[in-house]
Amino acid sequence: MCESYKMRCQCGKNSADIFFGRNILDEKCLARLYCPECSEGVERKAENRVWDNGWILEFDMDEVRLHAPTMEISPDSVTAEWVFDNGFATWAGITPEDAEIRNRERAEILRLAKTDMPAYLEVMKRWGKERERRFQQEGWRKMK
């Protein structure tokens, strides 16, 4: 079973749910997380960082390279962006906070299913489409 890990950002105000696909990497591969508030001034060009709408996930590339052969990539070729985009260590959802927000919104909609199933199905469909459209417009990495 794949695991997720909650990580606090450097300023301590926010957190992200990180998903480790295929159980190859774990929290040891993560160095730092920056939210939009604490990412200002952080160097953009770095092979150990992934930028996504002001959020930065920084990897311990020495730890990542240890697992590169299992991920079927050479240690010299692996980058933070590759790890993130291929789902080995990425957001648990579309955004850093999506898993928590999605569950809360879904729970509210689910209450409608107990009283009006057709309305529930319509609201759930509309909610999913609106979320997808919003994430695309906001430019989240997973929606490109």
Image (cartoon, rainbow, N blue to C red):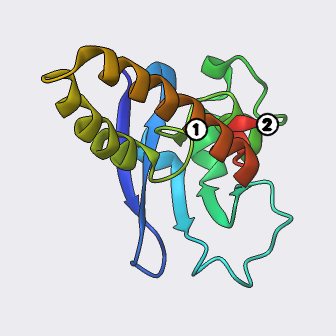
Q: Is residue 29 left or right of residue 66?
A: left
Tag 1 secondary structure: helix
Q: Amino acid at mark 2?
A: Lys
Q: Amino acid at mark 1?
A: Glu
Residue at image coords 67%, 39%: 133
Q: Is 61 placed above or below 116 here?
A: below
| Front-most of residues 18 and 36 | 36
Residue at image coords 74%, 84%: 41
Q: Which residue is mark 1?
A: 130
Q: Position of residue 51 (x, y in %)?
A: 72, 58
Q: Position of residue 19 (x, y in %)?
A: 45, 36
Give the quadrant of the C terminus: top right
Q: Which residue is mark 2?
A: 144
Alpha carbons under labels 2 and 1: distance apart? 16 Å
How crowded pointer 1 is (Cα within 10 Å; few <14, some 14-19, many 20+) is rated as few
Q: Position of residue 91 (x, y in %)?
A: 52, 43
Q: How many badges with numbers are in the image?
A: 2
